[in-house]
Image: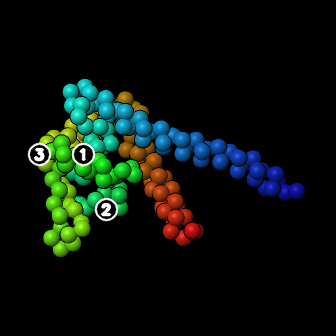
Amino acid sequence: MSIEMQLRPSAHRGFMAGYLEALALVERLHRLLLDVIKDEFERVGTLEINAVQALLLFNIGDNEVTAGELKTRGYYQGSNVSYNLKKLVEMGYMHHQRCEIDRRSVRVRLTQKGREIRDVVSALFIRHAEGLQSRGVIGPEGIEDITSALKRVERYWTDQIRYIY
């Protein structure tokens, strides 16, 4: 048996363990991000909006989009986008308007109240970015490396969905 064949199972197990750890870390980081946002809104006394909704408002920003575009543009990762849009409109954080060309389509954009929430999340992210750098947790090169690697994984998974099934 060649040395390559002897090493492959061990190397494969090591890679697999690292891959599974990375998957778990991505999931934990997303949940932790939502907790961080929730805590920020508790700190500033804004309790009627949840972290998922606040992140959605941040991601929409100054754009006007349809509900369908929220997922395709990566603004919303959850499965209950209709519920959250309805709640945000009811609470006055978003405007919604039927598209005049396609009456089935609804376009949404932030109200002033929604932009204020977006600004709270933006300020939080700015503080975190500055803190990560000033404390030496991670710098620009590290962020570039992480982002680049995650984009490659995203592209691989997207290809698996599109071309394998």
Spot the residue most to the right.
1
Contact check, label 3 and label 1, Cβ < 8 Å: no
Q: At which x and y percent is residue 49?
A: 25, 37
**Amino acid identity at mark 2:** Gly
Judged from the image, the secondary structure of the residue bearing numbered disc 1 is: helix
* Distance from the alpha carbon under mark 3 to that under mark 1: 16 Å
Which residue does the image show at 49% across and 63% down from the upper left?
158
Q: Which residue is mark 1?
A: 87
Of callouts 3 and 2, the N-terminal one: 2
Residue that lies at the very extreme toward the bottom in this rendered image: 101
Above/below status of 111 relative to 134: below
Q: Earlier in the sequence, mark 2 or mark 1?
A: 2
The residue at the point 58 percent across, 68 percent down is 164
Q: Residue at x 76, y 50 (%)?
A: 9
- 3 and 126: which one is in front? 126
What whole-number distance in Å separates the C-alpha atoms at marks 2 and 1? Answer: 17 Å
Q: In the image, what residue type sits under mark 3?
A: Gln
Counting the numbered discs, the total is 3
Name the quarter where the N terminus is drawn. Answer: bottom right
Q: Position of residue 35 (x, y in %)?
A: 37, 33
Quarter of image, res 74 = bottom left
